[in-house]
Image (cartoon, rainbow, N blue to C red):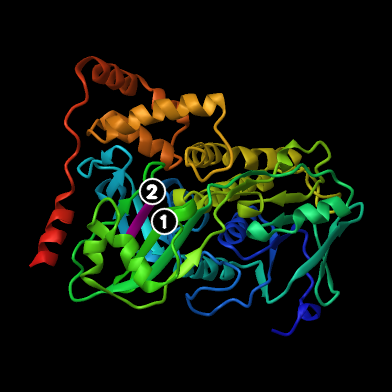
Amino acid sequence: MAGVASWPMIKSSQPHVLIIGASLAGLFTAAAARAAGAQITIIERDVLPERPIPRKGVPQSRQPHVLLHRGLLAAEELLPGIRDDLLNHGAVPLAIGTTAWLGEYGWLPTWIPTYETISATRPLLEHVVRQRVNDLDGVAIHEGVQVVDLSRDARRWQLMCEDATTVQADLVIDASGRGSRLPQWLVELGIPVSEPLIVDARLGYACRLYRAVGKPPIEIAVVIAATPQTGRGAVAIPVEDGHWLIQTIGYGEWRPTRIPEEFDEFLATLHDPAISDLTQHLEPVSDVAVHRQTGNRRNRYERSRVWPAGLLAVGDAYCSFNPVYGQGITVAACQALLIREALKHDRTPVGHGPMDTRRLQRRIGAVAGVPWSVATTEDLRHPSSAGSQSRLQRLMSLWTARQAQLVGHGERSAYLAFLRVYHLMAAPITLFNPAVIAATCRAAVRGMPEPNPRPRALNALAANRTA
């Protein structure tokens, strides 16, 4: 890369949007802003790989990533055809309803049709999205460049880069992730910044990539949830190139290490042997990678009464979630859709000052509201968390626990309501719909039906191992 000084300066009647970070949040936002007619510059600290491999700026890139169904729909709206692009690169389509999921109250149903999602490694997902965005006319990605300062005059923002070059923009969007320097820059600009909300249950992951020996023994994902009672769990998910990602999950003292022998022991001592059985049909093709930066952290920019015009924060730069719930990428894609619509309808004349983004930042915050509530309410149930649930959270936990019991006993209405909320297809009020309330009342009067059976595929897996 030649350096910032060689950048061509954008000369256009279209507004110039500058995005800090070529993360998935930054890429989705770039696609959204370009669809609204803006000229886009993305500044990325990393030198981006030409093929789908992990990079330094995404420390969690070796861990499993699955788009929730709402995220897949949003990504398809931002980049039409992205689903097929991922499948053409080997990503695996997954029917959520077939996943073998052992939760706090037993196995979830595997016979009720639900949503589709796409399974791929994080490097492949980012690689395909980046290719699509890079091919858009009016988008420029400058890599290997660090933004070190942010300032503004009466009309435009100025970003100072590490070589002292200054770049101007009408709108600046911070998509630089958990390591965002925006709080520091705001203080330097004299803008009050509230302390972020933090809920950290001290969750740790360890992940290893495998490949099947011969024909893959099963074609479904397997989840053994880490509950407040067990503190430990694991995930096995098929990804591109016939590979599998196996991840161990532990809270507090149960956080897994990167030692291969301990990884195998962790799987073997879980409260169900399904994933340990699966690994007997696989062979590892990578070392064990660990990740422990999993606390929920939410900046409260939407509360600012003096939020500067022409500035936004999206994705993990605004709100980061415990990755175990798989919400971050979906939230970022939905936030990008909001930005697209806001830019399309912005009435601020080009050249007459940056758009008023205070209301838009609040709407971006609202997108994160439900996922934040889900993640923090659940994390505060774990003994390893330093905080405690509010009264409202305790009431919600009691109700959702009852629904989880129904799901573990095959109640269709409760299961579908749970999935609609979890995949961000509906508001939490869906958990209180008449069908779910009726099922709850029936269970209270008649007792719970029989629990769901263990999925047959897992029984066959164990039988094959024994054979």
For the residue marked with disc 1, what is the amino acid? Ile
Q: Quadrant of the rendered structure where residue 411 is?
A: top left
Q: Quadrant of residue 13?
A: bottom right
Which residue occupies 32% across, 72% down?
210
Q: Is residue 265 left or right of residue 316?
A: left
Q: Is residue 212 left or right of residue 24?
A: left
Residue 416, percent across and down? Answer: 32, 35
Residue 326 drawn at (x, y percent): 46, 51
Q: Residue at x 59, y 47 (%)?
A: 335
Compared to residue 68, the image places residue 142 above or below, namely below
Is 91 displayed left or right of 60 in the figure?
left
**Secondary structure state at the residue bearing disc 1:** strand
User: Mark 2 falls on what kind of element?
Assistant: loop
Check the picture and name the quadrant holding the C terminus.
Answer: bottom left
Magenta-highlighted residues: 231-236
Query: For this view, does 55 lie left or right of residue 206?
Result: right
* Above or below: residue 46 compared with residue 378: below
The total number of labels drawn is: 2
Q: Nearer the viewer, residue 328 or 446?
A: 446
Q: Please tell me how crowded label 1 is: few (under 14), some (14-19), or many (20+) other residues with Cα within 10 Å.
A: many
Look at the numbered discs 1 and 2 and tell me whether their residues touch, using CB distance below 8 Å. Answer: yes
How far across and down, in percent of the image, does residue 206 sit?
43, 64
Q: How far from the left and from the top, in percent, is residue 212? A: 24, 73
Question: Looking at the image, which is closer to me, 108 or 27?
Answer: 108
Provide the residue designation for mark 2. 226
Callout 2: 10 Å neighbours few (<14), some, many (20+)? many
Q: Mark on residue 249? A: 1
Q: Residue at x 42, y 49 (%)?
A: 68
